[in-house]
């Protein structure tokens, strides 16, 4: 347990010492979301329709940014070897690393999302559902993305490969997250979609760390 | 009991590239011939014998390639997932090679299914593409094939490429139902059933016969191509093995 906390603290500290990298992800998220009105025109009705979808696509792309480097530094300097040898099971260590990654890259997105929602003229209820969906969905994005990151560890083309492998698998999260906001806006209630997202979150939380650890073993054999 | 162990030892016997290589070499011409004969028969029935459809006219005849291609695209992914389990579970080299040889054929059939679907959709629905649940999940299946092929070809170390590819194929196979249902629910909430693929009237017997013949032809073709490709992979990977040089001298 203390090892787990130590990994978490270590990762958070490392990331905090390189704050600008964190700001980059957030900046990318906001910029991508702001491009759509420029391309599609600023008709308020149109913006309200596409708002949730745009924020979700931007979140999907933004979470991809840091992924290729997720295990790379640890792989290069041998930390990954140490983690594999440590008494702590590798899936747990992976989970601690991912928790830190999620806290530092995805939570800021969730906090910035309401502002983007306001820019797109979403109602208060819709913004609430958007944030709730992002809080449930971004951990899944991190977990699925980490599988791709682990499989492409140390490859020259990993920057391009991760999105190609990971994005098709992330489609359900996108559909459920954007669908929840739309269902809320149309008066159907977001409950079923959010429940599905929560179910997906639980399934991936249980299954993905072992898959990631297995992928890391394949890649660093 | 005795027969099952005998069968198992047969299976394990052909799990070795050295014994499978000549077997594949003997088998693939038969599968290729079956594919040609069945495809000719299927096309003859489909294009000459089967009646014109009452509502769709002759445009429906594209199903004789479209439906078999769509079936094969899904079936081949399942077979790849099966070989992925063997690769990760038993660490057999041949199953990884089979998985790798099947992927391009699967991607090709997915593409053919999408392409012919668009060609059929234009005269029938009046549009090349709709974001229907089946079309969308077929498109995502195509992306899954591309991801698998991209990952395998990006890794130089064969053992790592095999195992990483197997894992990605398995993760994809587990995700396919999730993707299919999420796309289905998304579609039904978004745009209602303006076009339904399921209202196809019961088919005339000749249509069904032609389609089944074509489906089996596509199946035989896939096996033949996979066997040829796996032979090439075996030669590539075992080029230093003594048995291969002997086999090469015998050929």
Image (spheres, grey):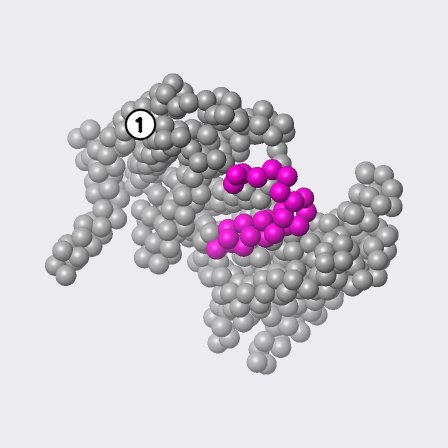
- Where is residue B25 shown, x and y percent of the image? 24, 33
**Of the pair A106 and A20, the residue shown nearer to us:** A106
From the viewer's perspective, is B75 left or right of B192? Answer: left
Q: Which residue is located at x 78 percent, y 63 percent?
A: A128
- Residue B91 picture quarter: bottom left
Confirm whether the magenta stretch covers residue B200: no
Q: Which residue is located at x 85 percent, y 45 percent?
A: A45
**For the residue labelled by badge 1, is the local secondary structure a helix, a strand or a loop?**
helix
Above/below status of A197 relative to B96: below
Above/below status of A150 relative to B106: below
Confirm whether the magenta stretch covers residue B184: yes
Q: Which residue is located at x 74 percent, y 66 percent?
A: A16
- Where is residue A184 shown, x and y percent of the image? 75, 58
Instruction: Give the main secondary structure of the magenta stretch.
Output: helix
* Quarter placement of the C terminus of chain B: top left
* Quarter placement of the N terminus of chain B: bottom left
Above/below status of B56 relative to B163: above
- Residue A19 picture quarter: bottom right
Q: Which residues are magenta?
A: B174-199
The residue pinned by badge 1 equals: B38
Q: Which residue is located at x 41 percent, y 38 percent?
A: B72
Q: Chain of mark 1?
A: B
From the viewer's perspective, is A50 left or right of A85? Answer: right
């Amino acid at each position: 347990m203390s090892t787990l906390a130590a990994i978490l603290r270590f990762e958070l500290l490392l990331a905090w010492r390189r704050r600008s990298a964190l700001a980059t992800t957030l900046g990318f998220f906001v910029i991508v979301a702001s491009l759509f009105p420029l391309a599609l025109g600023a008709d308020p009705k149109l913006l309200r329709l596409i708002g949730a979808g745009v924020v979700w696509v931007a979140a999907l792309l933004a979470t991809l940014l840091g992924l290729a480097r997720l295990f790379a530094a640890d792989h290069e300097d041998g930390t990954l070897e140490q983690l594999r040898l440590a008494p702590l099971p590798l899936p747990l260590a992976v989970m601690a690393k991912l928790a830190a990654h999620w806290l530092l890259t995805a939570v800021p997105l969730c906090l910035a999302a309401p502002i983007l929602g306001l820019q797109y003229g979403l109602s208060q209820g819709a913004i609430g559902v958007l944030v709730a969906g992002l809080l449930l969905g971004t951990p899944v994005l991190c977990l699925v993305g980490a599988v791709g990151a682990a499989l492409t560890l140390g490859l020259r083309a990993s920057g391009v490969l991760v999105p190609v492998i990971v994005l098709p698998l992330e489609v359900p999260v996108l559909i459920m997250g954007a669908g929840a906001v739309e269902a809320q806006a149309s008066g159907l209630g977001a409950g079923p979609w959010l429940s599905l997202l929560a179910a997906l979150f639980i399934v991936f939380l249980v299954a993905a760390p072992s898959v990631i650890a297995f992928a890391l073993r394949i890649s660093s054999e | 009991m005795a027969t099952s162990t005998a069968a198992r030892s047969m299976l394990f016997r052909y799990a070795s590239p050295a014994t499978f290589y000549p077997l594949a070499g003997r088998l693939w011409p038969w599968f290729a011939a079956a594919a040609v004969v069945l495809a000719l028969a299927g096309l003859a029935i489909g294009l000459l014998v089967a009646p014109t459809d009452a509502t769709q006219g002759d445009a429906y005849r594209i199903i004789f390639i479209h439906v078999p291609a769509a079936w094969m695209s899904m079936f081949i992914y399942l077979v790849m997932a099966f070989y992925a389990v063997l690769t990760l579970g038993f660490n057999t080299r041949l199953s990884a090679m089979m998985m790798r040889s099947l992927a391009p054929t699967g991607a090709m059939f997915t593409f053919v299914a999408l392409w012919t679907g668009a060609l059929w959709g234009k005269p029938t629905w009046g549009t090349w593409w709709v974001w229907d649940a089946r079309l969308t999940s077929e498109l995502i299946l195509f992306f899954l094939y591309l991801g698998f092929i991209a990952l395998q070809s990006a890794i130089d170390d064969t053992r790592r490429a095999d195992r990483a590819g197997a894992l990605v194929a398995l993760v994809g196979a587990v995700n396919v139902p999730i993707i299919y249902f999420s796309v289905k629910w998304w579609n039904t909430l978004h745009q209602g059933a303006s076009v339904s693929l399921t209202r196809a009237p019961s088919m005339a017997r000749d249509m069904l016969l032609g389609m089944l013949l074509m489906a089996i032809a596509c199946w035989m073709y896939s096996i033949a191509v996979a066997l040829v490709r796996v032979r090439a992979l075996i030669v590539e990977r075992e080029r230093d093995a003594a048995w291969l040089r002997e086999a090469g001298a015998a050929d």
